[in-house]
Each structure stands twice: as C-alpha cells, then as structure tokens.
Image: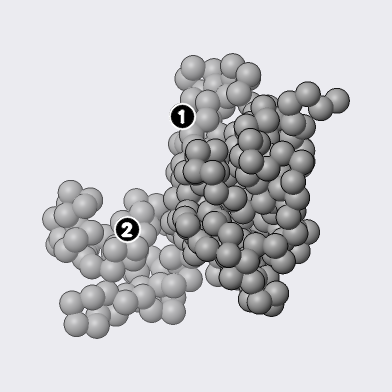
Amino acid sequence: MDLDRLNFHHLLYFWRVARIGHLTRAARELHVAQSALSTQIRQLEDRLGEPLFEREGRRLVLTEAGQIVLSYAENIFGLGQEMLGRLGGRAEGMLRLRVGSVATLSRNYQENWIRPLLGDPTVALTLESGMLADLLERLLQHRLDVVLSNEAVPPDTDRPFHCRFLGSQAISLVGSAGAWTRRRLRMPEDLHGRDLAVPGPRHALRGQFDALCIAADVRPRLRAEVDDMAMLRLIARDSGWLTVLPEVVVQDELRTGVLVKVGRSEQLQEHFYAITTTHRHRVERLEHLLEGSRRALRPMRPAGAV
C-alpha cells in the first residue's frame, strides 16, 4: 500500500480508541457519533488489510496487527504533540523547554540544573513535578522534553528511554550552627538514639539509610520522615533535629552558616539522571544542559570560607 493512500485522520481515531479501549467513550471524547467512528476504523482496517481490534465483552482488545499499528501511531502523534509544544513559544520568538522532575528531587538541584537558562530571554520554561511513572508517560507522549530523576530507568524495548547519568552526591548529616559548630558525628555509628529527620519511604535514599543502620545495629529516633525535599529543608532549618539529606537540599543554609555539616557518609549516595526518549528532536539548549549538568552539584562553601 502506498503511503498516500493511508488516511491519517482514520489513524488518529484508531489511536484514540486504542488508548481508551472503548468505542463509546472514545466517540464521546472525540465528539463524533459512535457509528461514524466505527466506520472510520473499519475503513482503516480495509486499507491495511488486517483487523485491528477484537471484542472481549464490551471492551475492544488490540489484535497483533493492532499492537503494531498502535506502536507506530504513538510515535507519529507523539511527535506531532512534540512539534506543537516546540512551536508553542515561537510566535513570540521563544523556545519552550518542558522539564519534568520527580517529586522527591531537591528543588535546589532542579534550579541549579536550569540556571543557565534563567537569564536567556529566548527561552520559556515549563516545569512539572510528579511521580516518575506519570512523568515517563508524559515523556512518551512527547509532552515533556526531559525528566530529572533520582532513580534510573532500566532499558526496555517497549519504552524507548535514554537514561543519562548526571552525577552523584554523598549524603550528609546536618544540624543547627548553634548546637553543632565544630562537632562531628560518624554515620551511622553515632546516631543511636538521636533525634533525626530523614527522607520518607518513597525516597530513593531511604532504603540505603535503613540498611546502613541495620548493618551497624543502630536505631536512631525518627522524628520526621519527609518525601518532599523542600519540606525536609525547612525541618532541618527550624526543628533543631539532625537531618539526613544531600547537601544540595540545604546549600543556601550551609553557605550562610545557619546549618553546619555534622557528618557525611560516602556509602550513601543520591544519584541524578536525565531521562529522554530515543526518538526526540534534539534541542541545542537541552544538549548543553545535559553536557554541563555536574555544575548542579557544585559544593557549597560556608559563609566566610575562601
């Protein structure tokens, strides 16, 4: 079959029905009659010479041919969405860059990462935060250009992601300057019975920290378990408890001397990744960010240091 005989409008309708899995709901969302939608799907099947759906009760299930067509339709219309997003700011002479970040990632790290663009008048930023699975789905739909994560995404032939390692940072123990200046503790040996604020169970670091304490037979008093790094930063600053976190989370407080580093564990590391799709359109400014990403983890000097 020649490409010019393929009706991409019919393919679009197939894509929407395949994603929803129900003809009536798809027709409602597309604002067309169910009979008209069914007719256009049949016309696409006739053009391709293969049935694309089979019925299981009230649901439509993709045939083997339908799964193949869906994989191509995802790329075709996903790239169309990417094109629209890319062109979104061009009317004002701007490039729009869409960045997703997992909810447990430090906001300071994110700001450090995008900092080279903050003074660029030709760039408009869209910043989203959420669960990794949701962000990856938006990445596959080409609604995001890159996802920043502290979890790696393993290779998967069904999901064409490229996961680039950006760097690591050892985890520190920080405390208020008034109580802990010039005092040091070993991690985890000296933490038994001490009041601590720590990352919550969903954070990639938490499992590492718990395993380290168990291996050393150390049981700290966990006064706060916090997934959101912005909130953990506030607790570190205002509670008086010792806090386990990456230094980038409290970089400003360390620099101004509000907080001091009390201990550090090289056995605990937070890793940072940038996830893109293999089919994406390459954007020069994004490539520059990826190449220079280690600056986002630059060490913070305390106030008065030289």
> 90 above or below 148?
above
Between 133 and 173, the one nearer to me in the picture? 173
Quadrant housing residue 195:
bottom right
**Mark 2, residue position:** 16
Q: Are marks 2 and 1 in contact (CB under 8 Å)?
A: no
Which residue does the image show at 68% across and 43% down from the upper left?
Answer: 180
Residue 280 visible in the displayed image = no
Disc 1 marks which residue? 88
Q: Quadrant of residue 153?
A: bottom right
User: SS for tag 1?
Assistant: loop
Q: Residue at x 47, y 57 (%)?
A: 223
Q: Residues within 10 Å of mark 2 (few under 14, many from 20)?
A: many
Name the residue: 16% across, 54% down: 28
Q: Residue 127's x, y, as percent?
A: 49, 37
**What amino acid is at disc 1?**
Gly
Callout 1: 10 Å neighbours few (<14), some, many (20+)?
A: some
